[in-house]
Image: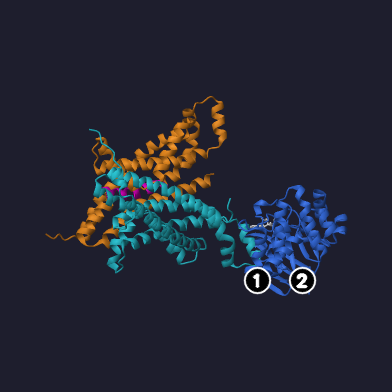
Chain colours: A orange, B cyan, C blue
Amino acid sequence: MFVQFTTWDIVRNLLEGGKWTLALSLIAFVLGGTAGLLVLFLRMARNRVAQALAKGYIELFQGTPLLMQLFIVFFGLPLAGIDVSPWLAAALGLTLFTSAYLAEIWRGCVESVPRGQWEASASLALGFTQQMRHVILPQALRVAIAPTVGFSVQVVKGTAVTSIIGFTELTKTGSMLANATFQPFLVFGLVAAGYFALCYPLSLYAKSLERKFHVAR
Amino acid sequence: MAYQFDFAPVLAHTDLLLQGAAATLGLTAAGAVLGIALGVLGAICRAWRIQPFSAAFGVYVEAIRNTPFLVQLFFIFFGLPALGVKLSGWEASILAMVINLGAYSTEIIRAGIEATPHGQMEAAASLALNRAQTFVYVVLRPALARVWPALVSQVIIVMLGSAVCSQIAAEELTFAANFIQSRNFRAFETFFLATALYFAMALLVRQLLMRLGQRFIVGRPR
Amino acid sequence: MSLVSISGLHKHFGTNHVLKGIDLQVEQGDVIALIGRSGSGKSTLLRTINGLESIDEGELVVDGTALHHGEGDLRALRQKVGMVFQQFNLFPHLTAGQNVMLAPTVVKKLSKKETEDIAKEMLLKVGLSDKFHAFPDQLSGGQQQRVAIARALAMRPKVMLCDEITSALDPELVNEVLAVVQQLAAEGMTLIMVTHEMRFARDVGNKLIFMHHGRIHESGDPRIILADPQTPELANFTRAVM
Ligand SMILES: Nc1ncnc2c1ncn2[C@@H]1O[C@H](COP(=O)(O)OP(=O)(O)O)[C@@H](O)[C@H]1O
Ligand SMILES: [Mg+2]
């Protein structure tokens, strides 16, 4: 059997895959951001053990390939009796990956808040969580927005790696289409264009935020 | 029954893992040298606005930074043969790594060049150095020294990213791990050890490059 | 003809008319102190003599090398004119010796042996022969500025320009730099220096130029005009700074 693909067929299929790329990116970014906040709190905590744990977590994820992280989730969870689909493994793996990077980015932002702010708020008898919540984070947030948006580009690009564990997003769809159509140049060109369409606006937005922030300072 | 971890079937293939690790390091070394060289070239064109190269590098940088490495790799390996460019897995991997690192280092090094204090350029001009001499003797090394830590981080990102080169049959560390786990059916243990190797390599490469930078770029071993 | 000859020189920054027709002759061996309020155009004048600022109108000739409207052989000019900056501007990745050797090596293409000899000679002249292998950040401000002087001298310039070269220094380091300049003057080097050190200007300079609003407002023998200013502006200025 031989199926003839028109360019439109290819684009339509890729758009379908692109939806999953988008969904996975959003999930990883939102969940990863939430988890990242948690890691950030541990990282900034006065408790030495918490600090060390958070630091190790961050270094582990920043020091190993995303593909290996996905493999370990994908092949590791079943050993604990948890059945994982590629979709779940992809979402979990990318969430962990995102949380480590965001925690580290945000730590830099928190540390850019002058020491005096910690001391002033401590002198008002605020506890650690209150200091973070009312004094430090609101100031760090301003600094954090641009690099956070910038990192979202890395998340979108990271989703491509999940194709290797069999999650059918944009890249996987592209691979299958390239095989079926014998037009890899066209297909991967379109796939690249799809990622570019997702990422470039985010990059531009991050850059404009950065510029705005520097002017405001 | 709980799963019994067994690393012995992986350790039986230690030689394959180490060969793969060496291949990953080799890919990284080639990618780093050529990629940073490309970055210096791109940064000069961008910082000095040498048209039309500056504009071309601008497009290149954005194209690479806004698409996944894996897709770049597939495009080169599967797509380029349509243009008559047929590359082996190794060649395609190195090319993709160079192109990828070249784009990031163009931006990183350009920032380093643009951070050159104005007084440095004036001092060089007052000593009658021309533009090229000023760049080579006064601007370049301090610019690289300023951004060296960022460049090292990028090299490591590229090294870790090269795990996906296993997908085009470049026989690096991940490829070796994949091969081993297909034989011993110990996927978790195999990938666990491979991950540990990557982690150690990342630490090692960072240390090594920071030292090399301190010695040859900052110019003063501390 | 004079060593440095400036006539009808004008310079604008946008709509800001900074130099409004400067005429100045500098003879071989002159030591000229440029004084004046901040913003009066002293630095700009000095920088045009080195080609760091282009000329809008007028002519500048240094030892036969001419610039008109920013046209001319800048690099030939710069080989005849040495410049020392307020902020030293040493190259941080090079040792003191390498800083001094750079221009003779890459511009004059002298051999390594020759440039090393020059560097040793010049560092000796500024009293830093033991700092050949020191990096700038291992030197005090006064030492860095002396290396900068040695670096400029290494090109064997016909005239040296010094723009407030002691202003960035801690007070206790000022004298070691001034002593080097004084020695250069005694050896017959032609010097044009912007300075706030009035005593130094009076004792070492043979000519004083007071700039005001982009013009040479008053000039002459420093001992005479500082003691007896002819214009109220210079009188005000000397009262304010002395
Ligand atoms: N690069 C420049 N661009 C624009 N304006 C300048 C520049 N350099 C100097 N100026 C202006 O020229 C005037 C003279 O400056 P300058 O020569 O530095 O004075 P001085 O050295 O006597 O303090 C000032 O009004 C200053 O703002
Ligand atoms: Mg000035």
Q: Residues within 10 Å of mark 2 (few under 14, many from 20)?
A: some
Q: Chain of mark 1?
A: C
Q: Amino acid at mark 1?
A: Ser
Q: Residue at x 26, y 52 (%)?
A: A172
Nearest the viewer among B203 and A189 is B203
Percent x, y of residue C180:
78, 58
Q: Which residue is mark 2?
A: C3
Q: How many marks?
A: 2
- Dividing the image into 4 quarters, which one contains the N terminus of chain A? bottom left
Quarter-of-image position of residue C184: bottom right
Q: Which mark sits nearer the N-terminus, 2 or 1?
A: 2
Percent x, y of residue C107:
64, 70
Quarter-of-image position of residue B72: bottom left
Q: Which residue is mark 1?
A: C111
Q: Main structural element of the magenta stretch: helix, strand or loop?
A: helix
Q: Nearer the viewer, mark 2 or mark 1?
A: 1
Percent x, y of residue C74:
65, 70
The residue furthest top is A125
Q: Does residue C232 appear anywhere in the picture?
A: no
- Secondary structure of the residue carrying numbered label 1: loop
Q: Residues within 10 Å of mark 1 (few under 14, many from 20)?
A: few
- Secondary structure of the residue carrying numbered label 2: loop
Q: Which portion, as a residue range, is magenta?
A: A150-165
Q: Residue at x 47, y 53 (%)?
A: B151
Q: Chain of mark 2?
A: C
